């Protein structure tokens, strides 16, 4: 095989994937698909009990329960990894909704710093642990692309992440760095954010989205696995929203 040929023959068989945010939603589903493809997983999550349940199902190489926004703990985690890994997926971190009229500046700065700081921290501390040609893959969103009341922090982060990922792809080469930008995904996090409005939101999307169904964690996980396996993909943002951005509002 020459250096210009893609190496897709083995998928994720015998590969090791670190999943940060692995105890629920997109992270958990991606870990399932990695295991189904013959790969190994290292599971990281904030909630020890949910992480334990995921470990019972997925038989990981290792688990670690901590908050990925804790940069000291994040650095220690990567330092303690026993050997190199092939891919790192980061689903940790949620959206921040803060209307200006009720905004606390310290909270706003903390939210923005945590999102970008975690992204930079994972890149900085994992750079010597990911094998050449492997992937550092982040999950972001599309919702902040349209201005709206309360979306200042989310919009700023949404705009910043693709630029940050593109630069990291150059600095971390030959490790590949990519971003998945998801629209509404039917996860426990989405349900907790919307509360009793979640069923109405699901029905609206089923009716209006071009795909006529709601995007689920398995859809995003399948894209994540593809990006890991396709060695030609780096420095890019991949939208997955079922056509939500095509709608007028």
Image (tube, rainbow, N blue to C red):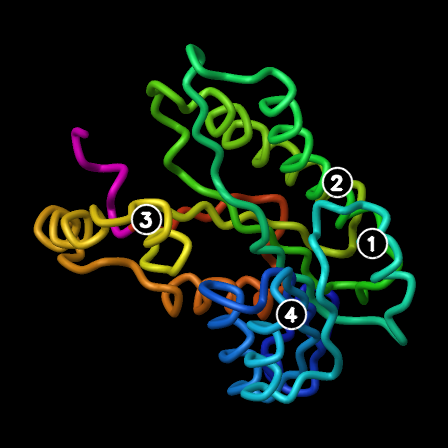
* Above/below status of 167 relative to 186: above
The stretch in magenta equals: 242-249
For residue 174, above or below residue 171: below
Q: Is residue 109 above or below residue 142?
A: above
Task: Using a 10 Å C-alpha cutoff, classify the residue at mark 1 as few (fewer than 14 neighbours), some (14 to 19) or many (20 or more).
Answer: some
Q: Which one is nearer the viewer's eye here, 97 or 142?
A: 97
Mark 4 neighbour class, 10 Å CA radius: few under 14, some 14 to 19, many 20 or more: some
Q: Which residue is mark 3?
A: 184
Q: Is 211 situated left or right of 143 in this image?
A: left
* Residue count near mark 2 (Cα–Cα under 10 Å), binned few <14, some 14–19, many ≥20: some
**In the rendered image, which residue does mark 2 sit on?**
120
Magenta segment includes 121: no
Spatial separation of the CA atoms under disc 3 and disc 1? 30 Å
Q: CA distance from mark 2 to mark 4?
A: 25 Å
Task: Tell me the distance, in whole angstroms, between the alpha carbons under discs 1 and 4.
Answer: 15 Å
Q: Earlier in the sequence, mark 3 or mark 4?
A: 4
Neighbourhood count class around disc 3 (C-alpha, 10 Å): few under 14, some 14–19, many 20 upward: some
Q: Which of labels 2 and 4 is toward the front? A: 4
Q: Which residue is mark 1?
A: 73
Quote the CA–CA distance across marks 2 and 3.
Answer: 25 Å
Left or right: 186 in relation to 163: left
| Residue receiving disc 4 | 48
Tell me which numbered mark, 2 or 1, is placed earlier along the sequence.
1
Q: Main secondary structure of the magenta part?
A: loop
Q: Residue at x 63, y 84 (%)?
A: 39
């Amino acid at each position: 095989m020459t250096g210009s040929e893609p190496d897709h023959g083995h998928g994720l068989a015998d590969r090791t994937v670190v999943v940060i945010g692995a105890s629920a939603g997109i992270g958990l589903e991606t870990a399932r698909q990695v295991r189904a493809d013959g790969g190994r997983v290292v599971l990281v999550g904030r909630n020890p009990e949910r992480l334990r349940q995921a470990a019972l199902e997925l038989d990981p190489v290792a688990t670690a329960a901590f908050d990925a926004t804790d940069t000291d703990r994040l650095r220690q985690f990567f330092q303690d990894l026993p050997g190199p890994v092939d891919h790192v997926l980061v689903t940790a971190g949620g959206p921040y909704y803060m209307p200006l009229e009720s905004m606390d500046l310290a909270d706003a700065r903390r939210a923005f710093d945590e999102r970008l700081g975690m992204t930079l921290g994972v890149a900085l501390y994992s750079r010597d642990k990911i094998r050449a040609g492997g992937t550092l893959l982040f999950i972001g969103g599309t919702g902040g692309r349209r201005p709206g009341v309360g979306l200042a922090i989310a919009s700023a982060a949404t705009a910043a992440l693709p630029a940050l990922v593109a630069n990291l792809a150059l600095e971390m080469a030959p490790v590949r760095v990519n971003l998945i930008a998801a629209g509404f995904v039917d996860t426990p996090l989405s349900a907790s954010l919307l509360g009793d409005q979640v069923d109405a939101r699901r029905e609206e999307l089923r009716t209006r989205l071009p795909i006529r169904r709601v995007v689920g964690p398995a859809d995003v996980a399948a894209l994540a696995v593809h990006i890991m396996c396709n060695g030609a993909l780096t420095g890019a943002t991949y939208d997955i929203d079922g056509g939500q951005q095509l709608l007028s509002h």
